[in-house]
Image: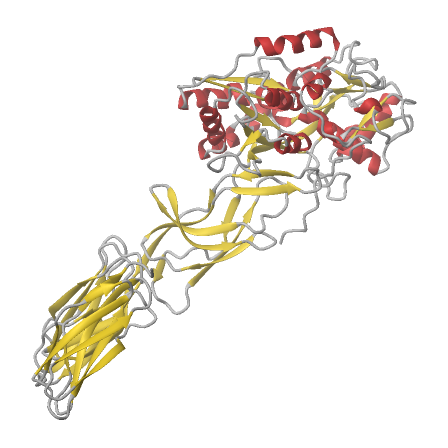
Amino acid sequence: MHTPFTPRRQATSGASSGRKRGFHRLALALTGVAAALMLMLAPSLASADTGSTLTVIGTSDVSDSGLIPNLIGPQFQQAFPQFTFKYIGTASGTAISSAETGSMGASALIVHAPTLENQFVAGGFSYQTSGTGPSTNPFGSAIWINDFVLAGPTGDPAGVAANGTNNIAQAFADVATAGVAGKATFVSRGGTPGTTTEEHAIWADVNSAGLTPTGVTLCAVPASLGGGLTPIASGAVTNGAACPGGVLPGSGSPGAGALPTWYAYTNLTQGPNVIAANACTATVAPSGANTCYVLTDRGTFDYLASGTDPAGSIPNLKIVTRGPQPATAPGGANALINYFHAYVLNPAKVPNVNLTAAQDFVNFLTSPTVQNELQNYLPTSVTGDPGGPPFIATANPTITVNAPGMPTTVTAGTATPTTITGSIVNKETGFPPLNGVTVSLSRIVNGLPVTGATATTDANGNFTLPFAPTVTGSYAVTTAAISKVEDATLTPPFGDVLSPSSSAATSVTVNSVVTALKARSNGSGVAVFGSVAPATGHVAGTVTISARPAGSKKGYKTLATVKLASTDSNFAAVPKLAPGKWQLQAAFADAGQVTTSPAKTITFKLGAKPKTSVSRDSTTVKGQTIKVPATVKPRATSKGGTVKLLVLKATNPAKPQFNQKDKAEVRKGRNTVKLKAKLSGPGHYLLELQYVSKGSTSSYTTLRGVTIKSTT
């Protein structure tokens, strides 16, 4: 049973609610002369993508954790050798701004900052990857999650491990308290990386929970920079007021407030920032060596802690706070979940996008190959982290079929079809249930789903599907790509695209049956008709009709073989048969599609041949209307007679019978009549004429097949 969804956390914005972006946001990420020089050089140094290159810009979490250089990059290059691959790891805010302006020549983007991504999407910079072109709702593709962790000195001077092991707001408050006392320093990347926007959200949780320590002031970050709160030097503003100038403290922008002494910006990417916290030099930390705390993602921390990262190691740090938190903790149970999304840049907004390469890259990230390999990257055996591999695949949802599961054998045509129940769950922990999603019972053909019955999930992501397969094969519950608003509390709302998914496939054998078998006299023979199940999906479906004298122990002799069209559920044949009592049987077969049905048997007594006959002179079809002139023998006597037009619709499993559509009286001395009928819609029909004359048993024509292709 799913609990009602509570947003993971709502961004807190200050007085400025506008969403000005572009170069403005990029400038906030860096400070100092060197940073300014980098900004001036970046556009001229960047080389735009061509048809043979792919540049991806994004969060340094995936590069500094080794995921891009060790796994994603080499495998993509091997799979797509036609593209020269390059990844630029930076802050999420910087990556987004650069993607929008095209200054770094990128065609795709990987970031983990929902409160910035929503603005990127609203600006039209994302290209819809799950459809055939740009969309009004072009969310990014979910690719994986990991978790944020707070790392601190092995001596833990702020006492976080004892007080806030699984409570990140309390841990931040403890570090701030120790910082005010000169015993600790919080080392932040600064600017608008996804990690820093997470810090701002946590500081907002600290304040809303009443944990803000004495001597600490927090100012409100504008929504355009991701929202939340951030530390600022005491006296700059009152606690909770908007940050001065609508920019971050310590950013170097005019009007920005100063940072508190215990809170340092490094303007570094993820890995170097953790290394700086490990070194904890006097330049960074006035509180002294081994007093630095840092928020980072667990992938980067584990890679550095493993000793296998060429960038260095971090022997002075340990994880002091990690999730999941108690549900009652500030920010909720999922406050430390780190959501990653990939975007194809919209070539209508961004110059020189290699659209083909970017789409190939996002499809590669969401492919089963890459998603499955994440579970083996940085395992506990390498890192020593009891939390296991840090990156968890989230590209597609999990589909579960409830016990007893999908049947392995199904008999077609049963009165009550099998029902499959189950649920679909978003792997992105903390996001709402997948309600209103279309799920399908699909046959898997050459690895691709062929959609059958469909249903829509309820409020908790549960589904109920009728299962009446028409073909033996491999079946699974599947979904197409799902576009989902994940956090409606943000403005604009934040959403993503989940890739198509499938439950485990089950091999199902479909047993066919013959039902409603009937027989009647038909002049010089017998009319045998009935229905088959499955009623559709025939490839080489045939019904074999056989007979033997009633009471005989000898084998049956084949009288007729009826070939069925793909959607023919009813069949009929008029084989010749001598008068007498007979056992008739019919069996349905469609090799490779279903098992051959058990023979359906009936007993029938055929009377003497009638004294009259009737024949069709011709049959014309125009639209849905058929015209059938007929001739009877002998000519009608004074008692006259009636010719009836009988029709069986082969594609109507509910009525395996001949129905009268028209009749005409044959007057004395005459032997011809004309009949006419309008058939009920497209389909395959079998028709015959019956002549009823007083003093003689009825006579019939042979069967005639007619196909109506449309109702116009």
Occupied quadrant, residue 317: top right
Residue in the image at 56% along x and 20% along y: 66
How many labels sit on residues? 0
Vertically, is 476 above or below 562?
A: above
Percent across and percent down for residue 110 are 58, 26
Image quadrant containing the C terminus: bottom left
In the shown orientation, is residue 134 left or right of residue 468?
right
Q: Is residue 389 visible?
A: no
Asked if residue 131 is positioned above or below residue 677 in the image, the reply reads above
Estimate the x, y position of residue 640 in percent, counting from the top left: 15, 89
Location of residue 645 with respect to 307 vertically, above or below: below
x, y percentage for residue 183?
85, 19
Horizontal side of 494 relative to 520 (left or right) equals right
Compared with 440, 23 (above or below) is above
Residue at point 19%, 76% (across, down) = 674
Residue 642 in view: yes
> How is the model colour-coded?
secondary structure
Q: Quadrant of the N terminus?
A: bottom right
Q: Where does the image place residue 18, in percent across and percent down from the top left?
A: 75, 30
Q: Taking 450 as reference, is 622 left or right?
A: left
Q: Nearer the viewer, residue 52 or 292?
A: 52
